Amino acid sequence: MPSYVRAGSLPHKRHIQFRRPDGGLFAEELFSTKGFESIYSLLYHVNPPTATLDVRPWQRPAIVFSDNDPLRNRHFKTRALAPSGLDAIESRLPLLGNAELLISVAQADVAMPYFYRNTGGDELLFIHHGSGVLETQFGELAYRDHDYLVVPTGTTYRVLPSSPTRMLVHESSGMVKIPRKYRNEFGQLEEHAPYYERDFRVPVLKTPVDAQGEYEIRVTSGKRHATYVVQNHPCDVVGWDGYCYPYAFNVEEFMPVTGKLHQPPPAHATFEAPGAAFCAFVPRLFDYHPLAVPVPYNHSSVDCDEVLYYVSGNFMSRRGVEEGSITLHAAGAPHGPQPGAVESSLGKTSTDELAVMVDTFGPLLVAQAALDCEDPAYYRSWIQTPAPA
Ligand SMILES: [Fe+2]
């Protein structure tokens, strides 16, 4: 997130001697992106983060994908997928993916006894429901229902749920950013943006854990995985500053743009990542032209796959969907309100629906867990029932 943040104790210059109360040196760490040429932070550890005792294999099950072939619109009822008793990482069930994005659901019922680090790209976690803490070397980020957690690549973290936490997980191959169109030449959010800097929550730095032992960090980068055993507790930071850190944004803080006529998804954009654009559809007033049609028009997004995750409310334009449903509207496959939805929407003034979306510009593959919860008749749900004779 391109805003400067500082926390805890820092030396007055970077890259100079910074001493602990016992006279020893704190260990400075540069946490940088795109080599040394994009956003970065500087962290000061009580003990060096480099002390690695062991590196072991971490066996993760290979994801079995199939093409969306024959190409069609799909519906997956992910609520039926109920991994229980697992942590935030072990419970991840990949559903859809391509070279740039992997989409999973996860159910964190218990705290992770180990740390986790994804060095293959940023993660974007959407908390459908649940509460707890994302513990990181930058501090603790408390989360709640409908939070997005943006986790930069390389962040070492644990999810510590205080209540069972259902989440939608996006693993990007690159950086998850605030859309450029919302920022001025200095990086500040512009007046027309649907959110403001103060809507973003940053980690609260806690007392550093000055402890040595054997701490497990499970590391993943695409298809490569490892378990590191490190000597020093990862959360031993006394201070950090910079532009790169995890943060939270609750979609209820998203101030939707409404119009005289229907606003397309880019009006609801939240984040962007390589090959992916994220949107949030939050409770809002409908369009105010006297002849406005509140539900979306039929459309074919001919060069992207649209993934909509239904969170809560009455999904007026979609028949058969439920909380936790995912619809995949495939590139070039026309879709829109189902029969009768346009007529029944006329005159409505507002919607209480909450849904989050990601469009991908590379075709999405379908994983086994999605097939396990698929509504196979979805692509026929626009068929018009003949009027009785
Ligand atoms: Fe669509």
Image (cartoon, rainbow, N blue to C red):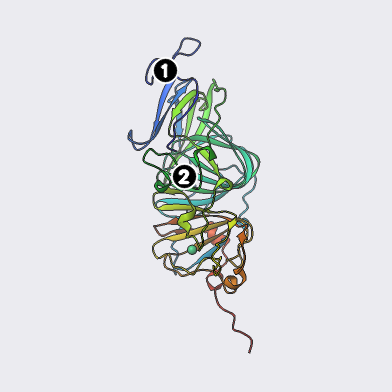
Please name whichever residue, 214 or 174, is drawn nearer the observer in this view of the structure. 174
Q: Check whether the beta carbons of the residues at disc 2 and disc 1 lie within 8 A of each other.
A: no
Whole-percent x, y for residue 334 in the image: 46, 70
Q: Is residue 331 above or below residue 135?
A: below
Please tell me which of labels 2 and 1 falls first in the chain: 1
Q: Residue furthest front?
A: 290
Residue 188 — which label?
Answer: none
Q: Is residue 18 above or below residue 100?
A: above
Q: Could you classify mark 1 by the number of other residues whose Cα lies within 10 Å: few (under 14), some (14-19), or many (20 or more)?
A: few
Would you name the residue on which mark 1 appears?
A: 12
Would you name the residue on which mark 2 appears?
A: 191
Q: Could you classify mark 2 by the number of other residues whose Cα lies within 10 Å: few (under 14), some (14-19), or many (20 or more)?
A: few
* Mark toward the viewer: 2 or 1: 2
Q: Quadrant of the C terminus?
A: bottom right
Identify the residue at horizontal 38%, vertical 35% (top origin).
Answer: 39
Whole-percent x, y for residue 146 in the image: 59, 47
Q: CA distance from mark 2 to mark 1?
A: 34 Å
Instruction: Report the amino acid beneath label 1.
Output: His
Secondary structure state at the residue bearing disc 1: loop
Quadrant housing residue 48 = top left
Quadrant housing residue 322 = bottom right
Whole-percent x, y for residue 40 in the image: 40, 32
Q: Is residue 96 visible?
A: no
Identify the residue at horizontal 59%, vertical 83% (top origin).
Answer: 386
Q: Is mark 1 within 8 Å of ligand 1?
A: no
Instruction: Report the amino acid beneath label 2.
Output: Glu
Q: Quadrant of the N terminus?
A: top left
Secondary structure state at the residue bearing disc 2: loop
Identify the residue at horizontal 54%, vertical 20% (top origin).
Answer: 210
Q: Is residue 316 visible?
A: yes
